[in-house]
Image (spheres, rainbow, N blue to C red):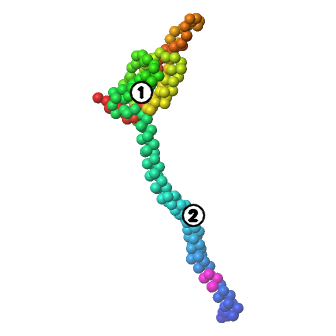
Amino acid sequence: MKIEIRQRDRRAILVLAVALLAYGLISRVLLPQFSQLREAAGDMAQKEEQLKKYRRAIVRKGRYSQMLEQARKNAAEAEGHLIRGDNASLASVELQTIVEDISKRLEIPLGPRSVTPARKRDEFFNEITMALSLDCTPNQLATFLSEIRMAPKFVIIRSAQVQPARIVSEAPKNEDFVKTLHVNLTLSAILSTPSRKG
């Protein structure tokens, strides 16, 4: 039996062969390329975001050094308000000088006072304390505390005990009554650098 292929069948086979060739070309070449393009578009968005980050870093690079320099200046300026701590004896003298200058300016006689040796406050700073007593009027006390707060060096008032120097049950008839207070203060100062021992 002889198989006879008609013109119409030849065209159908030719169309089928072209369709198979097109299918093979699409599935083996075009679809993988399309997938790669889609992945590349996603990668491109990531790379664009990364590029933006790099650009921001480059723009800020000069600003970071400026900010770091400004922070160093601010730290040095703030440290200038602390009592130097490289010598504990000089630090205690400086604290006493600040207190004595204020008391002389306000004409407040200072009583006994004592300064403790520097002790470690944290890993960066040490602290010295000074206990003192004084007799003054309420106005002098308020001014003294204000002056301590406004001192050129950073001095903290740790504690204050205020008592009347004399208790009066009634106002004197022949003399002016001056209210006098007896004050015990504990002041402390932070030292800018840890003091050396020995």
Disc on res. 98: 1
Please check the rendered image and state whether residue 19 is part of the magenta-colored stretch, yes or no: yes
Give the residue type at disc 2. Ala
User: Quadrant location of residue 152?
Assistant: top left
Question: In the orientation shown, which residue stands out farthest toward the right?
Answer: 8
Vertical side of 5 occupied by 150: above or below: above
Residue 7 horizontal/vertical position (percent): 69, 93
Query: Type of residue at label 1?
Result: Ile
- How many numbered marks appear? 2
Q: Is residue 39 left or right of residue 190?
A: right
Sequence-wise first label, 1 or 2 = 2
Query: Magenta part of the protein: which range?
Result: 17-22
Assign a secondary structure to mark 2.
Answer: helix
Q: Is residue 47 magenta?
A: no
Q: Residue 2's x, y, as percent? A: 65, 94
Residue 69, image x, y percentages:
43, 48
Residue density around tag 2, few if under 14, some if 14–19, many if 20 or more, within 10 Å: few
Q: Quadrant of residue 36?
A: bottom right
Q: In the shown orientation, is residue 18 left or right of residue 81?
A: right
Q: Which disc is residue 45 wearing?
A: 2
